[in-house]
Image (spheres, coloured by chain):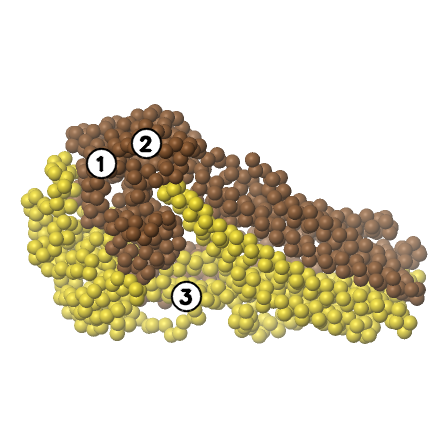
Chain colours: A brown, B yellow
Amino acid sequence: MTTFAAIARHGRGWLVVLGLSSLAGTACALALPALLGHLVDVLVAGGASGRWIALAAALIGLAVAADMLEAYCATACVAGTSAWLRHRLVRHILAVSPGDGRRFDAGDLVTRVSGNTVEAAQAGVAAVTVVAALLPPVGSLALLALIDVRLAVAFLAGLALCAVVLRAFTRRTTAAVGGYQHTQGRIAARLAESLAGRRTIAAAGTVDAEIDRVLAPLPELHAQGRRTWQVLARSVAEAGVAGPLVLVTVLAIGGLLLVRGRISAGELFAASQYAVLGAGLGSLTGVFGQWARARAGARRVLEVLAVAPPPHGRRRLPDGPGRLVLRGVTVRTDDAVLLSDVDLAVPGGAAVAVVGPSGAGKSVLAAVVARLREPDAGEVLLDGVPLATLDPAALRAAVGCAFERPVLVGATVADAIGPTLDRERVRAAAEATHAHEFVSRLPLGYDTPLPDVPLSGGEAQRLGLARAWHATRLLVLDDATSGLDMVTEMQIGRALTGDHGHRTRLIVTHRAATAARADLVVWLDGGRVRGVAPHAALWREPAYRRIFGGGDTAAPDGGRS
Amino acid sequence: MKRELRYGAAALRRRPLLALAAWSVPEAVPATVSGLVVARAVDAGFLAGRPVVGLAWLAGMVLAACVGAAGARGVYRRLGDLVEPFRDELVRRVVTGALRGGVAGRGDPGALARLTRQVEIVRDTYAGLLVVIRGFAVTVIGVVVGLLSVAPVIALLLLPPFLLGVGAFLATLPMAAARQRASVHADERLADAVGAVVAGARDVVAAGSQEHATTMVAGPIREQAAAERALAATAALRTLCFAVGGWLPLLVLLLAGPWLVDRGLTAGAVIGGLTYVMVGLQPALHALMSGLGGSGLRYVVTLGRILDADGPTPGPRSTALPADPGGSERSGLVVRGLTFAYGPHAEPVLRDLDLVVPAGDHLAIVGPSGIGKSTLAGLLCGLLRPVAGTVLVGGRSAEALSRAELARLRVLIPQEAYVFSGTLRDNLTYLRPAATDGQLRRAVAAVGAEELVTRLGGLAAELHPARLSAGERQLLALARAYLAEAPLVVLDEATCHLDAASERRAEEAFAARGGTLVVIAHRISSALRARRVLVLDGALATVGSHDAVQARSPLYRELLGHWARGAEEAAGTHGDRHEKAVPDGCRSSGTAMLGRG
């Protein structure tokens, strides 16, 4: 179990060095003013200063070394810990059931992996820093009091004044910045619109007018930007007045003490330096802020790690045709039942269409069958073996799944189809799904980097199909051909229904033509199976026909008129 | 690095810069007098047993702080005069670059991030640099002046090691900039890789390729950590430079102490000297280092990316030409030997295509998706340059025509309809700003958008593009194109989000509009309405009337068959599902459609 403490402990080697070096650095910083003050007294008195100067040089040397070590260790510790956390997170994200979409969306997860891990990795460093940052101001205060208690009181009074000014500063800035950001957002929104319509703009030759339109709020942004500087100017001025007050108060009280002979000139100098060091108390809020951010970041990272991955077994599939059985499968969200006690038996090698109105649970069924989502109750068996007991590699070799909106992952097109497949098999899969035609027109064919390929919905679907094509026992298509044009859909549909007996195919579809080509149709409604029969038999029911009403393939305009 | 600094320096305007310098003088007063005040307060006041004099000197310090604060206020107000025009220029540059690039066909997913995040970073760091560099100069000058008034010999002792430290730090900057750049790139590569894998988690699991996906991310994670460590090393090096510039002067002063005291230097003068180092030089050096090492590097790296992505702001703008009456005779298209490929190693999308579309024709282009229909539309409209061959629009070479001339000859409506924030009228008159209300109403009525216009609140209503459905956007784009004066209309799947009935109405309106109509068909019914059909099938093209193409193109027959079967199956009378050819029923419905269109 990973905890905040475990994250903090991960870089413990670095943390020990960090702690020791910041301790040494603080000790030097605190000793130095006293030493310098003493030196001043010795110098003025004409005493032997050599030993003291050597000591000062040694202290400064130590302080510098400690500083350097501290700077490096902190970053190295955070870098190492974030890398470790990122690895763990990515592995974990890929291990939990991805179809269980209720927890995190993708953008959120990316923030957690790239951003929150760094914050969380600060855990150890932040813990050390909080202690290390407390020492100099607290130590200075103590040493001021040691010289004379009245100096410490004067110091605290000066500090309180500073804090008031700094508070006012943050409040006003936030208000001024809000308007500026709003206008900036408007410009960005206009640019986004124009970029989305760039083909129209190119054809109309109106790019200059578009630039003017996008930039129209620029004068407003300019005025608001100026206002933020004015607010800042005021705050800076206030800080400029308030800042030296601490030093002046301490010097005044110290001077009076000097007149009465309570302290030496050197001690006055030391006191002034402790006043400067002690003013670091103001920056403590920043240190605690870092600690708070580390905790918040760790919480977001740990939330992801807390989701348990689904169980896996070690079993392999016996020989079989790909007979698919669902027993009492139920899937719920917090406030809805998506699939309710579904029992289903699909003969091996059959092509089965899954149809139903939107929200009937078709995609959930596909995800459960492809083991992308765990049922809350019930089980799915393939050739008699529960999917949950299968070896993960055996499961993925046997079951393939293609989606309506596939997300292609890989460096190149070939990678996206099958990172472990040789080129011939990649090409064969692409040819079977008619992706080869457009892939071969890409600048580097199958080696074209994926980011350089502007894919239409239909093209992405064809690559997604190619990726799933290798499945040996069961192929699940979740509305996976909806973006294809008529010809390609027909060709792929023929390839799909044509390879009789090789593997079972479960095809979620909105199209009557596809349902008609299948051996069997599973009709879902409200998370329940309403009927299992060939298309022609179900077609007699008006409610079944209504599912396809209004679809362009099912009822083209010729049929309607 | 030099380019970014030069760019920033060139943007500085003289007058605000002079004002900034002038306000810096009072701002420097506290730094200048700090050591002097302490020295006098001790020597003439507290040590001399005259506390009132000492306190008076300290009051002088508060006064100096007030003068300094007034100076700082002036400085920051003037900062807006320098920074905001610079930011304006960057916004203009990013917007112009992104739009020009976008129009030239370069997709640019980073443009919005540049406009919001990166421009802001440059704005803040540019201001930060101005503050830091100017503050450093002012403090150093102030300290030197102060030291000279306390004891000139101290200045001679302190400055050489101080300047040595500054020089050493400046020498590390190019390396630090390179590492900063590497770190930013590593961050982005990591975010990209994680984004790709996480967004595709479902697909990765479905394909069982977790190992491959993890490896995709492992490299960027490792590189990012290495880049961070490299940055940490430069930070440590910076600390060393600070030791030289900040601490060495102090030691030099202490070592020279006995000698100085022998020559009559007072306790106050020594304390003053030490104060100048610790309150003046050290903070100034620290600010310079963290300023240049932090903001400065971020400025260089971020501005570098903006300058790389968005080229210099453009030269002369094209001026709008007057409308050209009688253009309808020049609305035909002649295509000869047209060949186009997306790269030197790519299969050509189109090979040696010949096509003549006489003025007044109605042509439908059909074929599987990804076969190059949109590419052909782009070529016909002069948006893409062919690898070989020519396109003549209205008898003139598309390549030789300017964008404005092309815009008067043809209008292209792409699949992704462009609707922008503005009034409905502005959106509709986009291609014909001088259109009258009557013309507007006729165009809206012709494409069947009246109901939509009413629902949106009339012509003066403000549009919120995000609230419109894809079909509504297409309908508005169609009305806009109908209103345009260009005689040649190219609809590139411009009706794909409309239902079949609305599509027919729109296409019939354009056919009746006069001029030439080219329709990239989304549904086969578009072909049945056209006078002639071009079937693209790989590099093979067949053109002719519906009947002629049906006789010659197996693909076209297949398309018709599929369409017909879809209709039949919906009617529940599907026959043998392996049947390829088309029964008679389809043809007749096809002919019926053709007759109507």
In percent of width and height, residue A419 lies at: 37, 49
Contact between marks 1 and 2 (CB within 8 A): the answer is no
In this figure, which residue is indicated by the disc labeled 3? B96
The residue lying toward the viewer, choosing from A460 and A278, is A460
Q: Secondary structure at mark 1?
A: loop
Density class for disc 2 (Cα within 10 Å; few <14, some 14-19, many ≥20) is few
Asked which quadrant contains residue A32, the reply is bottom right
Output the chain of dot 2.
A
Any mark on residue A318, and which? 2
The type of residue carrying mark 2 is Pro
The type of residue carrying mark 1 is Gly
In percent of width and height, residue B510 lies at: 18, 57
Residue that appears at 86% across and 66% down: B268
**Is A11 left or right of B62, judged from the image as shown?**
left
The residue lying toward the viewer, choosing from B275 and A8, is A8
Whole-Å distance between the Cαs marked 1 and 2? 17 Å
Of marks 1 and 2, the one in the foreground:
2
The first of marks 1 and 2 along the sequence is 2
The type of residue carrying mark 3 is Thr
In this figure, which residue is indicated by the disc labeled 1? A501
The residue lying toward the viewer, choosing from A225 and A313, is A313
Whole-Å distance between the Cαs marked 1 and 3? 59 Å
Can residue A560 be seen?
no
Of marks 1 and 3, the one in the foreground:
1
In percent of width and height, residue A19 lies at: 70, 48
In percent of width and height, residue B445 lies at: 21, 53
In what quadrant of the picture does the N terminus of chain A appear?
top right
Density class for disc 3 (Cα within 10 Å; few <14, some 14-19, many ≥20) is many
Output the chain of dot 3.
B
